[in-house]
Amino acid sequence: MYANILLSTDGSDVARKGVKHGMNLAKALNAKVTVINVAEPLLLVDYWSGVSQEEVDRFDAACNQRAGIVLEEARAMAKQIGIASELLHIPNAHPATAIIDTAKSRGCEDRHGLARAARPQEAIFGESDIGGPRGRKRAGVGSALVDI
């Protein structure tokens, strides 16, 4: 049914519980996991308010350092549970888009072609083109649909 389960984490306690649950599910299904941490970029308004390149670099470095800690924790958890894992940090990206793109590129889809990204209380159930004048795309997150 599932060969690769995508787990997203920000390192919070709630996300950590979700990652552990997802890893236990993967073990029961004899699947591997891909654990993703997405760091959003600084808001454009921050650039307009006189933020220096040095401050941007410090922000990026802090995000990378935090991701390293979070993903190392996930690696240790996967090792303890006894499952294969791939760990990814995606910097300067919109989380919903990065999660869906990673699900597709890493084969984290079920037999119905639905990309499911496991987070404690959220699952992304794929994306769809809704057409219309703006050609928007939507992603289902839990029971809500959001424009992406």
Image (cartoon, rainbow, N blue to C red):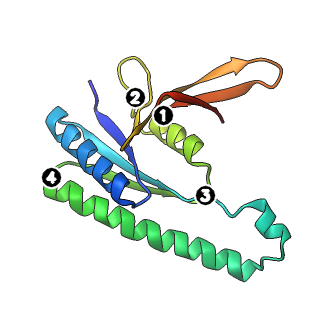
Q: CA distance from mark 3 to mark 4?
A: 30 Å
The residue carrying mark 2 is 109
Task: Point out residue 123 in the picture as x, y percentages from the top left corner.
Answer: 42, 34
Task: Point out residue 136 in the picture as x, y percentages from the top left corner.
Answer: 72, 27
Count up the numbered dots.
Answer: 4
Amino acid type of the residue tagged 3 in the rendering: Glu
Q: CA distance from mark 1 to mark 3?
A: 20 Å
Q: Name the mark on residue 32.
A: none
Question: Of marks 1 and 3, which one's residue comes earlier in the chain?
Answer: 3
Query: What SS does tag 1 mark?
Result: helix
Image quarter (top left, top right, bottom left or bottom right) of the C terminus: top right
Q: CA distance from mark 2 to mark 1?
A: 7 Å
Discs 4/1, front = 4
Q: Name the mark on residue 40.
A: 3
Image height check: is 11 above or below 63?
A: above
Residue positioned 80% across, 69% down in the render: 47
Count residues near mark 4 (Cα–Cα under 10 Å), then give few for <14, some for 14-19, many for 20+: some
Amino acid type of the residue tagged 1 in the rendering: Lys
Residue positioned 23% across, 63% down in the render: 76
The residue carrying mark 1 is 104
Q: CA distance from mark 3 to mark 2?
A: 24 Å
Query: What SS does tag 4 mark?
Result: helix
Amino acid type of the residue tagged 2 in the rendering: Glu
The residue carrying mark 4 is 81
For the residues bearing labels 3 and 2, Cβ distance under 8 angstroms = no
Count residues near mark 1 (Cα–Cα under 10 Å), then give few for <14, some for 14-19, many for 20+: some
Question: Of marks 3 and 4, which one's residue comes earlier in the chain?
Answer: 3
